Image (cartoon, rainbow, N blue to C red):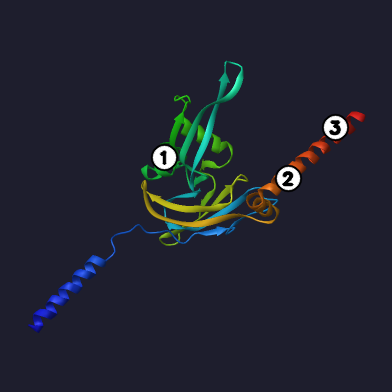
Amino acid sequence: MHANLIACCGRLVLAVLVLAAPGPTMAATDALSLSPPAIVMGAQYNGVDLTVAGGVPAGADVIVRLTGTPDELHLREKGKVFGLLWMNVGKVVATNVPSVYLVDGSRPLSQMGAGAVSYRLESLVGTIGVKQEGTDDSIDIPHQLLLLKAHEGLYRESAEGISLSAATGDTQRFVAHIKVPPSLKPGEYRVEAIALKNGAVVEQSQTVIEAALTGFPKWLSELASQKSALYGVMATVVAIFSGLAIGLVCQSRKGH
């Protein structure tokens, strides 16, 4: 009886171990290193060159992507009323719109195969949701949004900023340079590195970088959110003095 009990317990332990064993998972690239480790947005902030470095399997293609949290945008379409006045003629709500989408490849993503398709900038056209009210349905809103964000420097797809070193054994180091635009907003952003071979993703890794205001911009932002009345008075005073200064400059030029 004791032997049967021991055998039963042994089978139970073996079954638990089999159930608890982890299934197959995708390997991750070496830990990413960022320089600078955070984006500091002071009074002189005019964008930053972000360096991303890591390791991938030898001979792999590399994609590096910087993305922001998807957001909801409320837009208005303008049009001529009675052929004379430009007015708001419709509303558009766009959902799942990343605040920033910067992607770079060790070669053009169009040449990396099927595994790179979902990382391409044009893939966002299929993921952005659109709700229109009184607007022209013939306008491709997602495509127009991509063009607008690209014009602002917030969306970009390129194959210029990644360099690969010679392979050391089974590993190859990469360094990517991403130009972060001045129009970036404070917040957390995800940095990803994806390795592909034969058109399929074989390894990937990600980390987070924070963009934060400092100095005068931080003080001004806190003033606007915490003391909106005082901020409004200051903005009015600054506008008045700016107008006076411009008027004086114009008058002095006329005098000459």
- What residue do we see at 68% from left, 47% from top? 229
Q: Nearer the viewer, residue 174 or 49?
A: 49
Q: The disc labelled 2 sits on which kind of residue?
A: Val
Identify which amino acid the numbered label 1 is placed on: Thr
Answer with the quarter of the image where residue 25 lies: bottom left
Label 3 sits on residue: 250
Does residue 105 appear in the picture of this structure? no
In this rendered view, identify the residue nearer to me: 215 or 231: 231
- Picture residue at 54% right of the left edge, 45% below the top: 160
| Label number found at residue 127 | 1
Q: Earlier in the sequence, mark 2 or mark 1?
A: 1
Count of numbered marks: 3
Whether residue 152 sits left or right of residue 233 in the image: it is: left
Look at the numbered disc 3 and give the secondary structure of its residue: helix
Name the secondary structure under disc 2: helix
Q: CA distance from mark 2 to mark 1?
A: 42 Å
How would you rate the neighbour count of disc 1 (Cα within 10 Å): few for under 14, some for 14-19, many for 20 or more?
few
Q: Tell me the residue that label 2 is attached to.
A: 233
Q: Is residue 72 visible?
A: yes
Of tags 2 and 3, which is closer to the observer?
2
Between the C-alphas of marks 1 and 3, the distance is 51 Å
Q: Quadrant of the C terminus?
A: top right
Per the image, label 1 sits on a secondary structure element best described as loop
Q: Is residue 12 above or below residue 181?
A: below
Looking at the picture, does residue 55 appear above or below residue 254?
Answer: below
Q: Nearer the viewer, mark 2 or mark 1?
A: 2
Residue 87 point in image, percent of width and height = 58, 24
Residue 98: % across, % down = 49, 44
Task: From the viewer's side, name the closer residue of 161 and 241.
Answer: 241
